[in-house]
């Protein structure tokens, strides 16, 4: 099923904006509270939005776009631990999700059994978190200093792989939960109604982001 | 031939096993490093008593941005620690700093940044001009590269 390009673009911006606004508000709150923001954001919020958007629109490439939108939002919000690292990780997560979905030829019909739902959730969430974390560990120093020291990266890999366990367990719970929700058929929603809901929602996300920046500046 | 469900189940088991083993390894390694470096930091293979160094070296306060908030941090210069360790021609080297949790920035720290950066009483390394990913909590060692 091919979806109208404009409808898909608005959907990508909407889901990307939701992801970005969660990262900039909830993610920062978790970070300030000393909680494992990366694991909770990747395993719960990002993964839920990636899965919902994929099942809803069924369009390859959409999740890469979502990652780009969320990454840009994260980059321009001046709070959090390491802004550049977080932005890179978000973009990488969207891309990795897309690659796994493409290589695994996954589709909604595949999630007919609980075993498949749980194991897919574990695998996809783990790879997204671990992959995103690794990509940012490589790309951030390259961008900021132009150098990358492989032994430091290799020594930290067990730490990343260990932390990914929590994202995997959250993913194993999220995917069965999301797939149990009865999602509407996007192509059957009237265009007028679709845009009336989607565009103001995007604007609200960006307004919240600007408000967050102004209030805490 | 494996079907998709069986393949995913096997992958999930592998992923969880890797996660559990890595987690256990990290915890064990963290505890060991923490124990070894309880009172010392290892600089270029030499063990230096951190408390003595902290008392001896001149304290300085710098401003750095953390979590979007500009804060003052007080500590001793990292370059002072390198000098105390007797590193020859320190300006010709780069430095790999590692925390007790095994974290080390994936790019070595230049001498210029070592001169700007400090280590606080809690052994946190702060670099005002570098992104947060270069900051290391609970310093365990400095390797001269």
Image (cartoon, coloured by chain):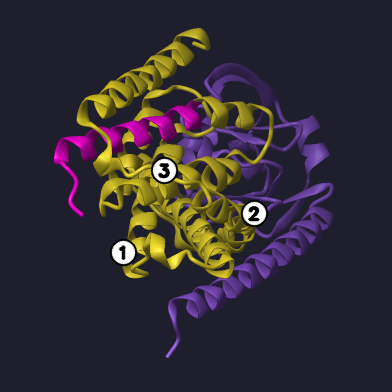
Q: Earlier in the sequence, mark 2 or mark 3?
A: 3
Hue used for the chain lettered A: yellow
Q: Measuring from the top left, give residue B25's x and y in whole percent.
A: 71, 67
Q: Do labels 1 and 3 share a chain?
A: yes
Please indicate whether residue B111 sits to the left or right of residue A163 in the image.
left
**Mark 1 to mark 3 CA distance (whole Å):** 19 Å
Residue hosting label 3: A90
- The residue at 74%/63% (across/down) is B29
Residue hosting label 2: A166
Foreground pick, A187 / B38? A187
Assign a secondary structure to mark 2.
helix
The verdict on residue B44 being magenta is: no
Q: Earlier in the sequence, mark 1 or mark 3?
A: 3
Assign a secondary structure to mark 3.
helix
Give me the chain letter of mark 2: A
**Mark 2 to mark 3 CA distance (whole Å):** 17 Å
């Amino acid at each position: 099923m091919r979806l109208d390009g404009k409808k898909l673009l608005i959907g990508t911006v909407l889901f990307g904006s939701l992801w970005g606004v969660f990262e900039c508000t909830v993610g920062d709150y978790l970070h300030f509270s000393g909680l494992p923001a990366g694991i909770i954001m990747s395993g719960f919020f990002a993964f839920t939005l990636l899965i919902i958007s994929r099942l809803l629109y069924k369009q390859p490439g959409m999740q890469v776009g979502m990652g780009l939108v969320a990454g840009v939002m994260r980059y321009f919000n001046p709070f959090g631990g390491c802004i550049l690292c977080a932005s890179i990780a978000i973009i990488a997560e969207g891309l990795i999700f897309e690659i796994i979905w493409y290589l695994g030829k996954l589709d909604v019909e595949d999630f007919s059994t609980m075993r498949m739902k749980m194991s897919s959730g574990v695998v996809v969430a783990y790879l997204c978190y671990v992959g995103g974390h690794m990509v940012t560990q490589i790309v951030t120093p390259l961008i900021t200093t132009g150098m990358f020291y492989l032994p430091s990266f290799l020594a930290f890999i067990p730490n990343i792989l260990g932390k990914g366990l929590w994202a995997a367990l959250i993913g194993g719970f999220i995917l069965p939960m999301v797939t149990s929700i009865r999602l509407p058929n996007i192509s059957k929603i009237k265009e007028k109604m679709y845009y009336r809901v989607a565009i103001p929602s995007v604007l609200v996300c960006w307004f919240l982001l600007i408000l967050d920046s102004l209030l805490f500046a | 031939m494996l079907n998709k469900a069986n393949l995913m189940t096997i992958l999930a088991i592998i992923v969880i096993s890797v996660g559990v083993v890595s987690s256990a390894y990290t915890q064990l390694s963290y505890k060991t490093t923490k124990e070894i470096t309880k009172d010392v930091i290892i600089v270029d293979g030499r063990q230096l008593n951190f408390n003595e160094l902290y008392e001896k070296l001149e304290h300085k306060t710098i401003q750095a941005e953390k979590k979007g908030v500009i804060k003052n941090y007080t500590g001793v210069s990292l370059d002072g620690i390198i000098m105390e360790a007797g590193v020859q021609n320190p300006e010709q080297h780069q430095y790999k700093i590692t925390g007790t949790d095994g974290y080390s920035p994936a790019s070595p720290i230049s001498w210029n940044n070592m001169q700007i950066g400090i280590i606080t009483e809690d052994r946190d390394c702060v670099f005002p001009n570098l992104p947060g990913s270069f900051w290391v909590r609970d310093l365990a060692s400095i390797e001269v590269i």
